[in-house]
């Protein structure tokens, strides 16, 4: 249905409301006369954006509205909205004047937008690029922004915008090819040599360019063998970029003779970084083909610093892990019973299948001739070490002696958050998160500052008192969770099985009657369900939980932890509270890797009410923590006494909408969110945030663990 354009009076009336003219004294008539001549759809678009910007600043909204008609003639609506939101982002970060500058420099934004229209934006492409990188074999790596593409062997750095070719799809492929090339540098031994020697060989910029060109030849051959489909795309990209550039200025005849021989040598499966350096010493100073669009740069200085720290740390961690493996494999051997000749460290043996690439599954570890199945974190260590050296060095294969290494020396030292709050606030070492502004319909970027704080253990009688108080309930819960652990799943339509599948038999008989071939899948069988569950409990520690609510939360967590230990599922417990966006505090009670021991129980006993409940930032942080966890089922269960609230504008609809958006982000990552609350008014807002079936309102601690058991049964079976 098409609506008639708004009148001048109707537009002025709306703008007066948006600009709050009674207090700002903004004159809406000038803007209204610009808007009134536009089609109704453009009128609605400009007015809606003006309303959203006015939620941030009325004067900024007025300046936008003055230029909006001109902007619509130069850009489509998507880019106009991006321009407007860029101004509000600048307002958040820098203030009103820089935000006004974005609005006034419309022509500059339009010119930039023309470039960006065909560009790939790294921030937007990360959800695809990061899983692609993680899917490549070898060490797990990260992606970050930098002016040029390079790697320090742990992080791949890429330009924030890629606009080499004419379409966003092609530029995205350049990102992908750059990741593959930089991964290949690490995976195929570009830095598997004395880095001082490499630095000496590539001191001049021309030498670095030549080195990169030579390594590109060798690494492209490696990619061709391991990733042939991507290699074909890379060659298409190379051809497309070459068509845009002037012809090469170096001697083609010389290239055909000399560089063809180099290409043959470096493309061989046995070629290594030493072959590259040998070829580098044989070419002339001015002899170098043009740089490839995805080859990246070489930064030996950054690599040296990162590798030196990692090699020391991984050697210590690996040798300590071997010591722990030895204790597990030989629990009956004690140092007291050992003879003097047994004082030498135990030596392990390592084998790798040289016909395959470096992956954890191709490395075998043995002790006294017997194969060992090391845990996953040890396999990851072995893989990372082999990426650096091409093998596990012999000196790594000795189990560490008592006290030989203090792993705390290799743990990054963090500042005490309590010390930060005592002085002038700064964000060093904090986690920074966006926050959703429903009025703006856009995020406040890098808005909330979150710090993780420890809960100090308090060794008292609370744990024992809770077990005694709820011993009947605990016994019932243990029985329930034992049954849940041992549940089998009935698989239907199987080729072989324990019983006849009546439904499948009826279908097969109907097929035969209609002249079709009879199916052989006519049986059922029971299959033991393998559990792969991870859950984070987010516990409200706001000041409003003081009293019986706090006690109920602590008792519930004790009971839950007791029965979750039966299932063997991974779980973490964090409390949350804070004051304003600058002080969001997450209290670690139990991380995924922490055991459920006396210290954890003492931490639960010491959960104390704090300040306010800014929920969105903590949900986003929990979502980020889940990225490090491999599980088929991920649960996020919040225990709260009421709706989101904070000292500033977060209370009310703003907080509810931000929490809802954070929950949507978690759902998008495959996380099941559920809320359990004692707020009797929760039915007014929880269905909007969590969905009608993803919350429960209770008034008795005894119902909480039972409700969680029901959630587990529903989501994990």
Image (cartoon, rainbow, N blue to C red):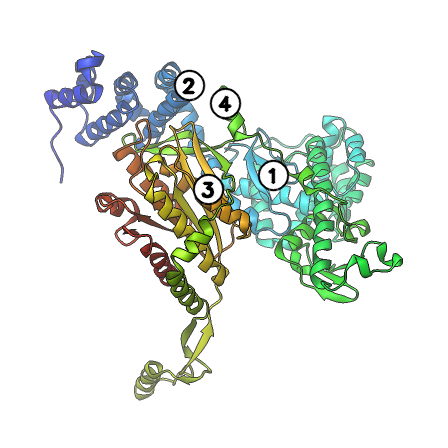
Q: Quadrant of residue 199?
A: top right
Residue at which label 2 appears: 94
Circle 1 SS class: strand
Please rate how many residues cluster around mark 2, counting C-alpha atoms within 10 Å: few if below 14, some from 14 to 19, many from 20.
few
Instruction: Answer whether labels 4 and 2 touch (C-beta < 8 Å).
Output: no
Q: Relative to 164, does residue 138 appear above or below in the rendering?
A: below
Cα gap from disc 3 to disc 1, whole angstroms: 39 Å
Q: Earlier in the sequence, mark 3 or mark 1?
A: 1
In this rendering, does residue 415 appear at all?
yes
Q: Quadrant of the C terminus?
A: bottom left
Q: For residue 155, which numbered disc appears in the image?
A: 1
Q: Quadrant of the N terminus?
A: top left
Instruction: Answer whether labels 3 and 1 touch (C-beta < 8 Å).
Output: no
Residue at which label 3 appears: 606
Circle 2 SS class: helix
Please rate how many residues cluster around mark 3, counting C-alpha atoms within 10 Å: few if below 14, some from 14 to 19, many from 20.
some
Q: Earlier in the sequence, mark 3 or mark 2?
A: 2
Circle 3 SS class: loop
Q: Earlier in the sequence, mark 4 or mark 2?
A: 2
Cα gap from disc 4 to disc 1, whole angstroms: 34 Å
Does 93 sit left or right of 68 as displayed? Answer: right
């Amino acid at each position: 249905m098409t609506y008639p354009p708004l009148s001048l009076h109707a537009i002025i009336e709306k703008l007066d409301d948006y600009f709050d003219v009674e207090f700002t004294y903004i004159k809406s008539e000038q803007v209204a006369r610009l808007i009134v001549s536009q089609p109704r759809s453009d009128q609605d678009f400009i007015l809606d954006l003006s309303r959203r910007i006015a939620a941030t600043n009325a004067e900024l909204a007025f300046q936008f509205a003055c230029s909006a008609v001109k902007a619509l003639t130069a850009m489509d609506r998507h880019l106009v909205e991006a321009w407007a939101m860029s101004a509000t982002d600048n307002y958040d970060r820098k203030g009103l004047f820089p935000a006004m500058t974005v609005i006034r420099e419309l022509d500059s934004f339009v010119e930039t937008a023309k470039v960006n229209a065909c560009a790939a934006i790294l921030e937007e492409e990360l959800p695809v690029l990061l899983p692609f990188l993680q899917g490549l074999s070898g060490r797990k790596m990260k992606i970050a922004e930098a002016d040029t593409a390079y790697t320090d062997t742990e992080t791949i750095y890429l330009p924030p915008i890629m606009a080499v070719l004419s379409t966003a799809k092609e530029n995205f492929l350049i990102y992908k090819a750059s990741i593959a090339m930089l991964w290949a540098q690490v995976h195929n031994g570009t830095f598997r040599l004395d880095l001082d020697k490499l630095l000496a060989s590539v001191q001049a910029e021309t030498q670095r360019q030549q080195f990169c060109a030579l390594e590109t030849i060798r690494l492209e051959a490696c990619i061709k063998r391991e990733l042939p489909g991507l290699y074909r795309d890379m060659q298409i990209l190379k051809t497309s970029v070459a068509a845009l550039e002037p012809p090469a200025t170096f001697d083609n005849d010389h290239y055909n003779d000399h560089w063809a021989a180099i290409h043959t040598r470096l493309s061989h499966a046995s070629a290594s970084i030493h072959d590259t350096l040998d070829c580098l010493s044989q070419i002339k100073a001015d002899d170098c083909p043009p740089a490839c669009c995805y080859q990246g740069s070489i930064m030996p200085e950054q690599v040296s610093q990162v590798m030196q720290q990692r090699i020391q740390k991984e050697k210590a961690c690996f040798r300590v892990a071997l010591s722990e493996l030895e204790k597990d494999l030989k629990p009956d051997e004690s140092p007291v019973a050992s003879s003097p000749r047994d004082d030498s460290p135990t030596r392990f043996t390592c084998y790798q299948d040289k016909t395959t690439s470096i992956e954890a599954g191709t490395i075998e570890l043995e002790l006294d001739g017997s194969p060992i199945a090391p845990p996953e974190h040890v396999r990851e260590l072995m893989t990372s070490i082999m990426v650096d050296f091409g093998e596990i060095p012999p000196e790594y294969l000795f189990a560490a002696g008592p006290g030989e290494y203090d792993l705390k020396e290799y743990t990054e030292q963090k500042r005490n958050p309590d010390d930060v709050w005592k002085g002038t606030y700064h964000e060093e070492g904090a986690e920074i998160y966006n926050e959703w502004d429903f009025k703006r319909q856009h995020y406040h970027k890098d808005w909330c500052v979150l710090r993780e704080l420890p809960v100090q253990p308090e060794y008292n009688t609370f744990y024992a008192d809770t077990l005694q108080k709820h011993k009947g309930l605990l016994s019932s819960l243990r029985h329930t969770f034992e049954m849940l652990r041992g549940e089998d799943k009935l698989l239907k339509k199987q080729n072989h099985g324990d019983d006849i599948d009546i439904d499948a038999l009826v279908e097969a008989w109907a097929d035969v009657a209609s002249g079709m071939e009879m199916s052989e899948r006519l049986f059922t069988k029971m299959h033991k369900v393998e559990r792969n569950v991870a859950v984070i409990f987010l516990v409200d520690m706001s000041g409003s939980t003081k009293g019986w609510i706090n006690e109920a939360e602590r008792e519930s967590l004790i009971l839950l932890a007791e029965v979750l230990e039966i299932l063997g599922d991974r779980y973490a417990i964090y409390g949350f509270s804070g004051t304003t966006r600058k002080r969001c505090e997450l209290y670690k009670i139990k991380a995924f890797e922490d055991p459920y021991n006396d210290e954890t129980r003492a931490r639960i006993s010491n959960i104390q009410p704090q300040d306010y409940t800014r929920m969105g930032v903590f949900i986003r942080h929990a979502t980020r923590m889940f990225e490090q966890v491999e599980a088929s089922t991920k649960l996020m269960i919040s225990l709260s006494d009421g709706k989101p609230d904070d000292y500033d504008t977060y209370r009310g609809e703003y907080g509810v909408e931000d929490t809802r958006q954070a929950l949507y982000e978690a759902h998008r990552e495959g996380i099941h969110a559920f809320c359990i609350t004692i707020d009797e008014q929760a039915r007014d807002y929880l269905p909007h945030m969590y969905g009608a079936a993803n919350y429960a309102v209770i008034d008795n601690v005894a119902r909480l663990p039972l409700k969680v058991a029901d959630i587990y049964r529903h989501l994990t079976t």
